[in-house]
Image (spheres, rainbow, N blue to C red):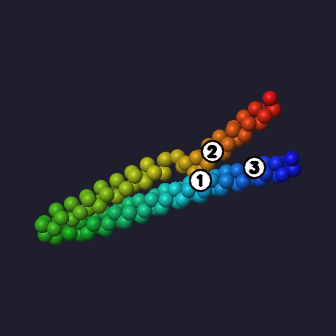
Amino acid sequence: MDSGLRSSIKRAVCTLTQLVSTRLALLANELYEERLHWEQMLLYFFAALFFLGMAIVLLTVFIVVLFWETHRLAALAVLMGLFSIAGMLLVYRLQHLTQMKSKLFSVSLAEFEKDRNELADKNVSTQT
């Protein structure tokens, strides 16, 4: 009887260890995904900053060149427009990313809730 109890406790501890290990791996995965999300947001932020900065520089050059020959104006205006459009698109994408709800730990919390419900169901069934 004593060895049966010991093996039962050993199996329970082993199962609990595996459960905790799985949940910790899930938490690590969610942290990694959140880090990738922040890296993507930073990339879009710096790209938008670059393109909007280029638009300002080109606008300045455009105004200076406006008083020179007329052939350079079209090229500067097109480049300035392209940089402005690219910068605005990236700002729009960045705003979209910041408005997305973070899913950090949502899967882990759902799994923990499922585990808790299963353990509660097992306790009810063993008591009856």
Residue matched to label 2: 111
Determine the secondary structure under disc 3.
helix
Drawn side of residue 59 relative to residue 73, left or right: right
Question: Is any atom of residue 64 visible in this view?
Answer: yes
Could you say which quadrant of the image residue 21 lies in? bottom right
Mark pair 3, 2: CA separation: 19 Å
Closest to the observer, 21 or 31: 21
Kind of residue at disc 2 = Glu
Determine the secondary structure under disc 2.
helix
Closest to the observer, 103 or 109: 109
Drawn side of residue 17 relative to residue 64, left or right: right
Closest to the observer, 110 or 115: 115
Question: Is any atom of residue 27 visible in this view?
Answer: no
Query: Which badge, 1 or 3, comes first in the chain's sequence?
Result: 3
Neighbourhood count class around disc 1 (C-alpha, 10 Å): few under 14, some 14–19, many 20 upward:
some
Drawn side of residue 50 relative to residue 71, left or right: right
Q: What's the mark number on residue 12?
A: 3
Query: Which badge, 3 or 2, comes first in the chain's sequence?
Result: 3
x, y percentage for residue 10? 77, 53
x, y percentage for residue 9? 79, 50
Closest to the observer, 124 or 66: 124
1 or 3: mark nearer the eye: 3
Q: What's the mark number on residue 26?
A: 1
Kind of residue at disc 1 = Leu
Residue 108 sits above or below residue 43 on the image: above
Neighbourhood count class around disc 3 (C-alpha, 10 Å): few under 14, some 14–19, many 20 upward:
few
Residue name at image x 39 percent, y 51 percent: 92
Do labels 2 and 1 touch, CB within 8 Å? yes
Considering every residue shown, the one lying at the far top of the view is: 128
Mark pair 2, 1: CA separation: 9 Å
